[in-house]
Image (spheres, coloured by chain):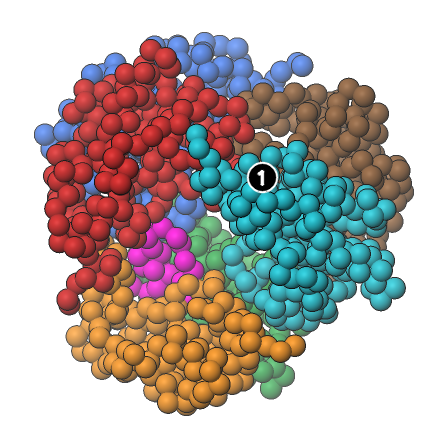
Chain colours: A blue, B red, C brown, D cyan, E green, F orange
Amino acid sequence: MKYRRALFIGRFQPLHNGHLHVIQRILQESEEIIIAVGSAQESYTLRNPLTVGERIEIIHDVLKMLNAIDRAYIVPIPDINENAVWPARVMEYCPKFDCVYSGNELVIMLFERFDIKTVRIQHIKRNLYQGKVIRERILRGLDYRDLVPEIVYKKLKQFGFDERIKRLVGMQNG
Amino acid sequence: MKYRRALFIGRFQPLHNGHLHVIQRILQESEEIIIAVGSAQESYTLRNPLTVGERIEIIHDVLKMLNAIDRAYIVPIPDINENAVWPARVMEYCPKFDCVYSGNELVIMLFERFDIKTVRIQHIKRNLYQGKVIRERILRGLDYRDLVPEIVYKKLKQFGFDERIKRLVGMQNG
Amino acid sequence: MKYRRALFIGRFQPLHNGHLHVIQRILQESEEIIIAVGSAQESYTLRNPLTVGERIEIIHDVLKMLNAIDRAYIVPIPDINENAVWPARVMEYCPKFDCVYSGNELVIMLFERFDIKTVRIQHIKRNLYQGKVIRERILRGLDYRDLVPEIVYKKLKQFGFDERIKRLVGMQNG
Amino acid sequence: MKYRRALFIGRFQPLHNGHLHVIQRILQESEEIIIAVGSAQESYTLRNPLTVGERIEIIHDVLKMLNAIDRAYIVPIPDINENAVWPARVMEYCPKFDCVYSGNELVIMLFERFDIKTVRIQHIKRNLYQGKVIRERILRGLDYRDLVPEIVYKKLKQFGFDERIKRLVGMQNG
Amino acid sequence: MKYRRALFIGRFQPLHNGHLHVIQRILQESEEIIIAVGSAQESYTLRNPLTVGERIEIIHDVLKMLNAIDRAYIVPIPDINENAVWPARVMEYCPKFDCVYSGNELVIMLFERFDIKTVRIQHIKRNLYQGKVIRERILRGLDYRDLVPEIVYKKLKQFGFDERIKRLVGMQNG
Amino acid sequence: MKYRRALFIGRFQPLHNGHLHVIQRILQESEEIIIAVGSAQESYTLRNPLTVGERIEIIHDVLKMLNAIDRAYIVPIPDINENAVWPARVMEYCPKFDCVYSGNELVIMLFERFDIKTVRIQHIKRNLYQGKVIRERILRGLDYRDLVPEIVYKKLKQFGFDERIKRLVGMQNG
């Protein structure tokens, strides 16, 4: 293993196949993984429809599916709105880690200031696998089963995700 | 099982045998358990010496020891300092739960306002099993191995818990 | 009366004839009314020009005009920026209510999560009666007397509302 | 009348005969009164047992009893925890006022910094009429009907005030 | 001298020749100057790339260059996100001042509410001397030496300002 | 010089001879000094009577007296109430420093977590030179001229420090 414990941070609105791919890679390269759920306090907006509790439940199911729950930590991180201080909050909330995987250049810059090792990831099929595409599919009445793990798809249906998106965008005819 | 998913909330400064006892009981009465780590933002004070990251790591180890990691969620909850609103934050941060176990009368009162079922627990050996007793033992140079699970004891030594307490109380001779 | 005490929430920037219409309806359907003034902390922006104190003063005058001051509560609600928690703050700040009137789908969704009865209102003449139209009239040098109750119009003039809007948009030639 | 609109600020935990006396005096000296409910966000503590919503409801009833509801404003003020800034928040939340009545020296000092006229009040029967005495009576099983207006007494019973105090202090035998 | 101590507030992202011009004017009209660094908590965004520490260091160097360090105060002001209260925070953080210079109409309006004297400044070469133009030059690979004092230019190079801007905008080819 | 730029952090309520002694030592050991004014947002309490603006003005005068104003930075630091994150805020607000001088064990522990060099200082005449002693002298009607630099003494008199302390403690006979 390259790392003792690696951090992967995202908002997971919702967790899609791109996230899944990164998680699988990290599980091969690190003994343990921390999945940090950013913007924890956000929910019921178009950009952040799910509550942090719902996101934790989904990630937990995915980790069980991957047989990795015993070497994974799921940690919600509320925003601090003070960029230069934010990595210190991540370090505070998480068990000690030795590497941060991210596809977000800002995240990488901010952790570099604290001399923490970062790995820049390229998301696969970036034009497909992103929350925005899923939300647009819903708004156009299309399915998105090919974009998320099956177990996530079922949870989203159970949470009323599609209807929530539609109501948030003002699509309802109530 | 009595419950689908039960919540147990505490500060776990540190997790002691009293907490362990409650966790074991809940694991017998509920399919899943959420362990909510309160006052997440507090650390490096006499009352709250451990960071939330350290507390999560300890609880994770205890759940693995109990073979319960696949039916448990560990969720840090930052304080909101607005009592009447606090249960809504707990509900937001956690997967949906149907019962709250607590030995804290305020917690019970606040959740009652939101019509959530509560179970009042009696902590065992309350005069021994509490963070305060552990901290006092450390300050008097006594051992506290009998107060916490062995796995927790080892982590605390690794985190430099004893020295941190001593320094916080002004025991250093620097 | 259908309700014991109904809540009507808005930002009232400023209170216009659409709001007035809803207030009159609620006064017919409920023994008491709570007018919650949302985004209380906002002021001196184009979207939220009035301070909360000014909005309270205007609503107070309108309620006196309607002979309803003795069965009305005016309650400012500062934003909490955490959607899933926000209804709990409204419940905390207001006397107990049994129904929420709103034309805002998000407000309705959030209160539904707490099992609170909601009434979805259709604002009358929505294309005319809204803060945005009033502000645009001011910026184009047009009058807006037909959009707000006369008593509100006078208060706005007294508060220097028109000039404030113009200065905020950079219309001054100083 | 001496004043156009006078401010009286307190926490009203709960409103007692001392507060009533001041309110009556201000109603004689000022055309309008603003009753600002301080520490709005506090509740369910021994020092601040009532929610702000409950306090607003009680003050509303007292003002109706005094036939003064049409010349009164009840305004909750959340704490800002920055003393030098706090008067600016009070000014923001309230309709414009020309005088502050207070028995609290800190309140007087802070408003003086902003050149606002203050009136230092002497509370009557200060050793009897205070929240602390009421709470102590409850804890010793004594009545407190002589300390608060009758209409307040009834509301407190309806809110379960006595039981709340007892539970908060750990008096329950559950 | 017209004033005993004048306040100049800006974000200084970065300090450019327009700011320099105003500072020089104030040094001629006032015995002392306070340079208040607004939005102190912002950094590592396109609009606010520099940390407050970096901005303080730059302003300090400029004041030394102007031989004015002994009659100047540099004071960071974190945002309060409550416009009507913000001038009170500025007054709290700064030594007492008798005048505010600003080119921002909102700043002028807010201070007027507190009866503080304001001077409306016209920035010179406004189409050239602004943070936005500097950032655009960097993104198009052009130099900006003519827009900032030489001493600032050197500091920016030392801080890696250009690269930071490029990474924030996603210009890197990593 | 041992250091390029050293940080000294305190609350300076008020700056006394003990602080002066440390500042003089740092000026001998470091090319530049940053004086960080902690708990910036606190004022008008017995423990923190002065506003941050007053404290900055006093420190500025002392640095001028020491002929050190051109190699000194005075930086207010608002509390963050999250110990594990606090050093990151200090690093954000201040120009880059290579050493922290402190007599406070918590400050030292927290900076050690970020691998920053610390120097533990012994305050001279600790039983005399502290804010608490000065406040007690005032309350007993004694002078404190021997505890603070003369220039500070004059500023405190000008700010009405003694009267403020007396009013805060309830000593006034108004």
**Residue drawn at 24 percent across, 38 percent down:** B129
Can you give x and y, in whole percent of width and height, for residue E83 in the image? 61, 54
Can you give x and y, in whole percent of width and height, for residue F58 in the image? 44, 80
From the viewer's side, name the closer residue of A165 and A5. Answer: A5
Q: Amino acid at mark 1?
A: Asp
Q: Secondary structure at mark 1?
A: helix
Instruction: Specify whether residue E3 is in view.
Output: yes
From the viewer's side, name the closer residue of C159 and E7. Answer: C159
Q: Is residue E151 left or right of residue A96?
A: right
**Residue drawn at 54 percent across, 15 percent down:** A163
Can you give x and y, in whole percent of width and height, for residue D26 in the image? 79, 60
Quarter containing the N terminus of chain A: top left
Chain letter for mark 1? D
Q: Is residue B144 left or right of residue B51?
A: left
Magenta residue span: F75-97
Disc 1 crowd rating (10 Å Cα; few below 14, some 14-19, many 20+) is many
Q: Is residue F86 above or below residue E149?
A: above
Query: Is residue F96 covered in magenta?
Result: yes
- Give the image quarter of residue F61: bottom left
Can you give x and y, in whole percent of width and height, for residue B90 in the image? 43, 31
Query: Is residue E80 covered in magenta?
Result: no
**Residue drawn at 18 percent across, 37 percent down:** B148
Q: Is residue F159 above or below residue A163?
A: below
**Residue drawn at 48 percent across, 58 percent down:** E78
Instruction: Specify whether residue C51 is in view.
Output: no
Quarter containing the C terminus of chain A: top right
- Give the image quarter of residue F2: bottom left
Residue under label 1, please give it.
Answer: D162
From the viewer's side, name the closer residue of A53 and C2. Answer: C2
